[in-house]
Image (cartoon, rainbow, N blue to C red):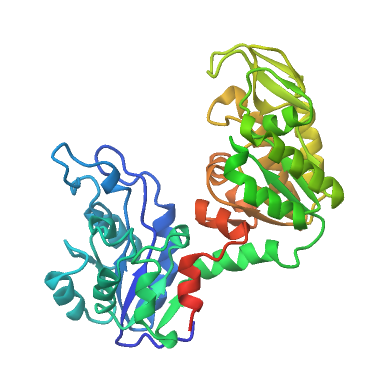
């Protein structure tokens, strides 16, 4: 990053939307740690840092009197831990914009850090209000967006604020650069063969991703609940497995498109089926297209694990987005675990692997394999939209001259 930060105030949009317990203690600081390199870089170059982030969706969980719960959603909960991570005391501003914010920002000295209050305490944030964004811009000389997880939102602090800085005074943070760079490795001239693993509950959540992958992947492996819509569309019997009836024709079209492009679209040969959606349910292994009434597929079966595993281990580039089953329940976690291990094995033999956000990240972390894959994205919805080929507002705002 070529910007001169010396004696400049730098407004950094980070993603500190971290989980808190009932005592308002951070239970997972992954997002905070991911932002540290950018903050530390500015401090090392003699700049001062003004941090802004959202936390939760306060407008969706109003108090009985209709007001925002400023006790639950305040970023004040993060100050002590952030100070410890950075090794410098972090000042906290009880507002995002206003006279106090302006005074605290103006008085910052090189090497100091100020954390603004939750951006979503301001109604203008989520609607991309220009007046709110302009007020934010007056706090600093430079704007950096390092919140990839929010880059698909055209919010005031993630997108609109950038228009008030010239091209030499705005940039991507180090995390944002890494996210884009690693996604682009998959999207543009990836090593071959490229194997994409797509899971999750619904086809409707991944339509655009599947359509895009069929255009450039060598093989697409489909697992999770969405597989049963494809299996039924192919004439299979799926019992009471999750099926989107209104997406059956779309599934047939995607299957046909894959055939016409000679792309392998692999569905699980067999499934772990259950008579109830519960840990205590009776289970058995059954062909995925021969599931009896009253039973549902909740994970890929042992034969599917072998077939998927072989394809993944033979790949030179792997993209994984979505679990293979209800991995939160131990009886239905083996498929996701097997895929996670296969991705790690493939990476260890030289393949490039990208874990594309959401539940896949939770799964790879749960299985302690995050260090054995090439890159784990911090942005669930943002990464999904980027892989679908959409131009994300937060990225466009920085690139726009």
Q: Is residue 87 left or right of residue 192?
A: left
Q: Position of residue 222 (x, y in %)?
A: 71, 39
Tell me which residue sits at (29%, 87%) in the image: 7
Is 256 positioned to the left or the right of 24 in the image? right
Q: Position of residue 67 (x, y in %)?
A: 16, 46
Q: How many numbered marks have been drawn onto this rendered protein structure? A: 0
Q: Kindly tell me whether residue 353 is visible in this rendering.
A: yes
Residue 225 in view, yes or no: no
**Lateral position of residue 115 relative to residue 286, left or right:** left
- The location of residue 260, given as percent across then percent down, is 86, 49
Is 22 or 222 nearer to us in this picture?
222
Percent across and percent down for residue 335 are 67, 32
Q: Is residue 233 above or below residue 52?
A: above
Q: Is residue 361 above or below residue 281?
A: below
Look at 42% across and 76% down and name the residue there. 41
Quadrant hosting residue 229: top right
Residue 316, located in which quarter of the rendered image?
A: bottom right
Quick one: 316 or 249, which is closer to the camera?
249
Q: Is residue 159 above or below residue 46?
A: above
């Amino acid at each position: 990053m070529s910007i001169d930060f010396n004696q400049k105030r730098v407004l950094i949009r980070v993603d500190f939307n971290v989980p808190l317990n009932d005592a308002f203690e951070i239970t997972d600081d992954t997002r905070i740690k991911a932002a540290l390199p950018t903050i530390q870089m500015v401090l090392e170059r003699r700049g001062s840092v003004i941090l802004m982030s959202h936390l939760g969706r306060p407008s969706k969980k109003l108090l009985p009197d209709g007001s925002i719960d400023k006790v639950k959603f305040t970023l004040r909960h993060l100050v002590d831990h952030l100070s410890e991570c950075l090794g410098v005391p972090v000042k906290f501003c009880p507002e995002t914009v206003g006279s106090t914010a302006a005074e605290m920002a103006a008085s910052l000295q090189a090497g100091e850090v100020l954390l603004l209050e939750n951006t979503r305490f301001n109604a203008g944030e989520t609607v991309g209000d220009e007046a709110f964004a302009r007020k934010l811009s007056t706090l600093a000389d430079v704007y950096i967006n390092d919140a990839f997880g929010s880059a698909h939102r055209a919010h005031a602090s993630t997108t609109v604020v950038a228009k008030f800085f010239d091209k030499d005074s705005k940039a991507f943070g180090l995390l944002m650069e890494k996210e884009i760079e690693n996604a682009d490795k998959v999207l543009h001239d990836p090593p071959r063969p490229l194997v994409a693993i797509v899971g999750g509950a619904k086809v409707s959540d991944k339509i655009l991703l599947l359509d895009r992958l069929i255009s450039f992947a060598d093989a697409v492996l489909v697992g999770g609940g969405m597989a049963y819509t494809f299996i039924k569309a192919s004439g299979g019997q799926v019992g009471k497995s999750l099926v989107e009836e209104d997406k059956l024709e779309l599934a047939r079209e995607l299957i046909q498109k894959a055939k016409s492009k000679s792309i392998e679209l692999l569905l699980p040969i067999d499934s772990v089926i259950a008579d109830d959606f519960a840990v205590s349910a009776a289970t058995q292994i059954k062909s995925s297209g021969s599931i009896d009434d009253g039973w549902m597929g909740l994970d890929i079966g042992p034969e599917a694990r072998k077939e998927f595993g072989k394809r993944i281990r033979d790949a030179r580039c792997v993209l994984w987005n979505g679990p293979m089953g209800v991995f939160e329940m131990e009886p239905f976690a083996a498929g996701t675990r097997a895929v996670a291990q296969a991705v790690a094995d493939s990476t260890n033999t030289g393949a490039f692997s990208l874990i594309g956000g959401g539940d896949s990240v939770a799964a790879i972390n749960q299985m302690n394999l995050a260090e054995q894959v090439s890159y784990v994205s911090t942005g669930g919805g943002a990464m999904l939209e980027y892989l679908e080929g959409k131009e994300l507002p937060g990225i466009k705002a920085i690139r726009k001259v």
